[in-house]
Image: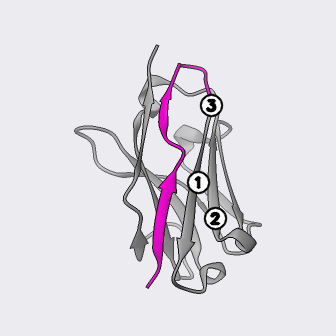
Amino acid sequence: QVQLVESGGGLVQPGGSLRLSCVASGGTVRAYAMGWFRQAPGKEREFVAAIRWSGVSTYYAESVKGQFTISRDNARSTVYLQMNSLKPEDAAVYYCAATRRRAVIPFLGDYWGQGTQVAVSS
């Protein structure tokens, strides 16, 4: 059983940056592909980004390409989401997920964190 704990959310002004972290425990974390999702009020949860266990292959939603960067540090069992040039439409609860499936896209999470809130407002 893998436990995922996100952190790093908060309130930021438009154009600002945040880095989210997700610490994993309870399993062989480096065997999992990791992903980030987000859910805004009144909307469905949507895929944001994913990264394979090696860290070499990354995947992004079209809406965040060039704006967000996913990375991982297997030694720290942590995956990051660097978010730059934030816009009000990026405001959401951001969730970390893990999967052992070979297919990363579509990302079907086997384990989920509780989420961290990101607010973008002046």
- Tell me how the rendering is colored: one colour
Taking the spot 55% from the left edge, 43% from the top edge, the residue there is 62
Whole-percent x, y for residue 103 in the image = 54, 77
The amino acid pointed to by label 2 is: Thr
Which of 57 and 99 lies nearest the eye of the viewer?
99
Crowding near the residue tagged with mark 1, few <14, some 14–19, many ≥20 C-alpha atoms within 10 Å: many
Residue 104 visible? The answer is no
Which of 108 and 96 lies nearest the eye of the viewer?
96
The amino acid pointed to by label 1 is: Ser
Left/right placement of residue 75 relative to residue 101 reads: right
Secondary structure state at the residue bearing disc 2: strand
Whether the residues at callouts 2 and 3 have beta carbons within 8 Å, the answer is no
Secondary structure state at the residue bearing disc 1: strand
Res 84 → quadrant: top right
Whether the residues at callouts 2 and 1 have beta carbons within 8 Å, the answer is yes
Find the distance from the CA under tag 2 to the CA under tag 3. 19 Å
Query: In this figure, which residue is indicated by the disc labeled 1?
Result: 21
Find the distance from the CA under tag 2 to the CA under tag 1. 7 Å
Query: In this figure, which residue is indicated by the disc labeled 3?
Result: 17
The amino acid pointed to by label 3 is: Ser
Which of 122 and 58 lies nearest the eye of the viewer?
122
Q: Which residues are magenta?
A: 1-17
Whole-percent x, y for residue 80 in the image = 63, 54
Crowding near the residue tagged with mark 2, few <14, some 14–19, many ≥20 C-alpha atoms within 10 Å: many
Secondary structure state at the residue bearing disc 3: loop
Taking the spot 53% from the left edge, 19% from the top edge, the residue there is 13
Question: Which circle marks residue 78 in the picture?
Answer: 2
Q: Classify 69 as above or below 85.
A: below
Question: Which circle marks residue 118 in the picture?
Answer: none
